[in-house]
Image (tube, grey):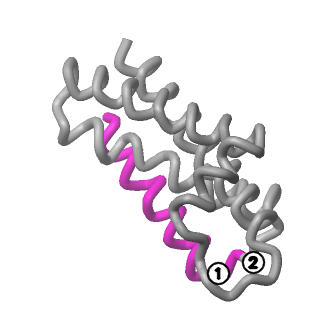
Amino acid sequence: MKWLLLMVVILSTVLGDVLQSREMKLAAGHHARPPRAHHVLRLIAGRRYLLLAVLSMGVSFFAFLALVQTEPISFAVPASAGSFVLETLLARLFLKEHLSRRRAMGALVVFAGILLVAR
């Protein structure tokens, strides 16, 4: 059960973060300032993928609560860092973000840490 919960946490976190980043970049256009809270609420209501991002983050939150209810936090938190590795890869592939060698190496180090904790 812990592996299923961990996968739900990671996948829903990644989906929420990637969709949120995509939608907020599209909504920002060329504005230099970050949007105010009421503007963000209007964006959420008007953009399907942003709403899906918020719902995904809710799923991630409740799945994480279930995970720490049954597993030690010393496992749950480091293992859920798998979202960092997957998000880094998807940011490069899906969002076309620049991925420096240093950042790629950092993601690999996080992945190695996850493997150590998972055993």
* Foreground disc of the pair 2, 1: 2
Tag 2 residue:
98
Which quadrant would the C terminus be assigned to in this image?
Answer: top left
| Residue located 48% across and 27% down the image | 59
- Whether residues under marks 2 and 1 lie with C-beta atoms below 8 angstroms apart, the answer is no
Q: Quadrant of residue 88?
A: bottom right
Which residue is farthest bottom? 32
> Disc 1 residue type?
Arg
Q: Where does the magenta region start and end?
A: 99-119
Residue drawn at (17%, 31%) of the image: 72
Q: Determine whether, in the image, residue 87 is placed left or right of residue 98.
A: left
Q: Amino acid at mark 2?
A: His
Across and down, in percent, residue 33 comes to: 62, 84
Q: Residues within 10 Å of mark 2 (few under 14, many from 20)?
A: few
Could you tell me how far apart the alpha carbons at marks 2 and 1 are, in whole angstroms?
A: 10 Å
SS at mark 2 in the image? loop
* Label 1 neighbour load within 10 Å: few <14, some 14-19, many 20+: few
Of 49 and 60, the residue lying toward us: 49
Q: Is residue 15 left or right of residue 92?
A: left
Label drawn at residue 84: none
Would residue 114 be found to the left or right of residue 17 on screen?
Answer: left
Residue that mark 1 sits on: 101
Above or below for 64 versus 90? above
Residue 53 at what x, y percent from top left?
Answer: 63, 41
Instruction: Name the quarter where the N terminus is drawn.
Output: top left
Q: Main secondary structure of the magenta part?
A: helix
Q: Nearer the viewer, residue 57 or 99?
A: 57
Task: Give the quarter of the image for residue 85.
Answer: bottom right
Measuring 69% from the left and 57% from the top, which residue is drawn there?
Answer: 89
Asked if the stretch drawn in magenta spans residue 7, the answer is: no
Element type at marker 1? helix
Front residue (pair 28, 9): 28
